[in-house]
């Protein structure tokens, strides 16, 4: 259950160069496999991240050694499971610089945003109110708001971006009219890689009495996050993109919101006392965690947080900036290749197209070379419409990738270009 960690990584805050990245990479068993007889180049971490040995061992250890339900049984296994599950909350809270009880475990970002939509927004919004989103949101930060808008009579407003893929702060400010009650913004775009200035955006919202929700799905795996410093009202995150198991995630919310919000799901574990005449609910975060949770998953998520903390998120960020610079420079030299999203402040996510080729054909041919990239609309139809394309290819890198893999990717792109001519 413990993190691997310190045996081969430098302490927090040391320069990226002091981390032995080859040894870090060796922690990820899946990265040793081949695809179509070629060593795998996994450039799809924005879709889901690979898992280090310690995370796999933590999940395995729970099922082998202390599989039991949490928060119910007083027997030894039950206590061990509960303490490991709650320890994951402590670790994630420390990682994010927040209080543990303000962190609600969810199945991922999608559920976290839906929790805010149904529990915070639905009872509050009225006809004439507005929800402000940005052009670069993932469908998970659009569709729940449309459902709430339909039921409350509220409307959706959109803040536009520049052609480079940068949030237009003047347009955002202008869109913050008195009817806007909630602002939803992604911290990092899953298509463009743009890192949004969330502190500034949340300050602008706060000054106007607008509640802010940040979608942190693509930020948490790649950079240090201090939620208190961001100053948002809600921060949604997903575990599987940050080396954790699928079906894990969380919503952080300001305590006053969690106390005022009614439960989203009802059932066991979220109550203090149930009578047929009525129920007294448990305190947050348990008020929002009805039923048996993904215990193994959250124990794995705790191990993932330990793993990332042992490397140091500042090191992860520096390493990925290096990989991004290398990949962008090489890709810019590929004839006919167009990168979509050129914000000055970017994470290692590169959407691209090659003249005359469909994104899916590109991704299929790259797969034959052992290179895994995603193609499609990336759950961002409004953003695709803005760029006038149905789909893009997306190479998304993580700290466990290597410069040699970038060279292989560029070589594969060269071959694919020839085939498509
Ligand atoms: N938001 C962004 C920016 C994402 O990239 C994703 C996943 O791709 C999500 C939300 C949804 O996350 P999940 O499917 O884990 O709930």
Image (tube, rainbow, N blue to C red):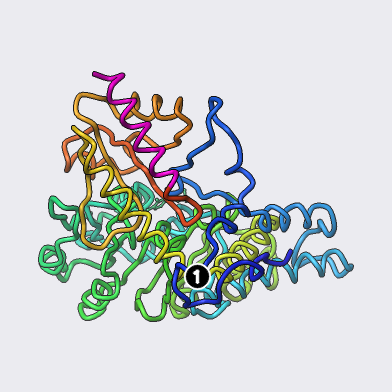
Counting other residues with Cα less than 10 Å from the Cα at mark 1, is it few (<14), some (14-19), or many (20 or more)? few
Q: Which SS type dominates the magenta stretch?
A: helix
Which residue is identified by label 1?
Answer: 18
Q: Is residue 413 magenta?
A: yes
* Residue drawn at (81%, 68%) of the image: 80
Query: Hey, which quadrant is residue 84 in on the image?
Result: bottom right
Query: How far across and how far down the image is residue 111, in percent?
Result: 49, 54
Q: Which residues are magenta?
A: 404-421
Whether 360 is drawn above or below 1: the answer is: above
Left or right of 269, for residue 221: left
For residue 65, side relative to residue 293 (left or right)? right
How far from the left and from the top, in percent, is residue 198? 29, 70
Residue 263: % across, % down: 53, 64
Quadrant containing the C terminus is top left
Looking at the image, is 130 positioned above or below residue 388?
below
Q: Position of residue 363 (x, y in %)?
A: 38, 30
Location of residue 385 by image quarter: top left
Residue closest to the eye, 267 or 17: 17
Q: How many marks?
A: 1
> Which residue occupies 55% across, 54% down?
107
Which quadrant, please, contains the N terminus? bottom right
Q: Callout 1: helix, strand or loop?
A: helix
């Amino acid at each position: 259950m413990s993190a691997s960690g310190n045996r081969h990584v430098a302490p927090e805050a040391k320069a990226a160069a002091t981390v032995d990245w080859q040894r870090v990479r060796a922690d990820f068993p899946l990265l040793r496999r081949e695809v179509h007889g070629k060593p795998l180049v996994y450039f799809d971490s924005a879709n889901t991240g690979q898992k280090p040995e310690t995370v796999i061992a933590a999940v395995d250890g729970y099922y082998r050694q202390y599989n039991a339900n949490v928060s119910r049984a007083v027997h030894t296994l039950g206590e061990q499971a509960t303490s490991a599950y709650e320890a994951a909350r402590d670790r994630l809270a420390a990682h994010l610089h927040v209080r543990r009880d303000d962190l609600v475990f969810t199945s991922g970002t999608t559920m976290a945003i839906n929790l805010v939509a149904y529990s915070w927004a639905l009872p509050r919004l009225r006809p004439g109110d507005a929800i402000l989103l940005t052009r670069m949101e993932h469908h998970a930060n659009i569709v729940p708001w449309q459902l709430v808008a339909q039921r409350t009579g509220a409307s959706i407003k959109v803040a536009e971006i520049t052609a480079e893929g940068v949030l237009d702060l003047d347009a955002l400010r202008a869109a913050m009219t008195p009817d806007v009650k909630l602002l939803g913004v992604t911290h990092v775009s899953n298509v463009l890689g743009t890192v949004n200035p969330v502190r500034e955006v949340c300050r602008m919202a706060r000054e106007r009495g607008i509640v802010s929700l940040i979608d942190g799905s693509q930020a948490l795996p790649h950079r240090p996050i201090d939620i208190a410093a961001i100053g948002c009202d809600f921060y949604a995150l997903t575990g599987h993109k940050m080396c954790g198991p699928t079906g894990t995630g969380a919503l952080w919310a300001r305590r006053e919101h969690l106390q005022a919000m009614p439960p989203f799901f009802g059932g066991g574990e979220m109550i203090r006392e149930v009578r047929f005449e009525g129920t007294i609910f448990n305190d947050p975060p348990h008020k929002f965690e009805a039923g048996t949770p993904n215990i193994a998953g959250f124990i794995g998520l705790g191990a993932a947080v330990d793993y990332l903390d042992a490397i140091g998120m500042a090191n992860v960020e520096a390493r990925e900036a290096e990989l991004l610079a290398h990949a962008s420079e090489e890709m810019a030299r590929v004839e006919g290749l167009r990168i979509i999203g050129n914000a000055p402040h970017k994470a290692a996510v590169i959407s691209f197209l090659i003249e005359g080729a469909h994104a899916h054909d590109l991704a299929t041919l790259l797969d034959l070379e052992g290179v895994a990239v995603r193609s499609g609309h990336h759950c961002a139809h409004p953003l695709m419409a803005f760029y006038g394309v149905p789909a893009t290819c997306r190479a998304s890198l993580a700290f466990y990738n290597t410069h040699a893999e970038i060279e292989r990717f560029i070589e594969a792109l060269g071959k694919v270009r020839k085939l498509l001519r």
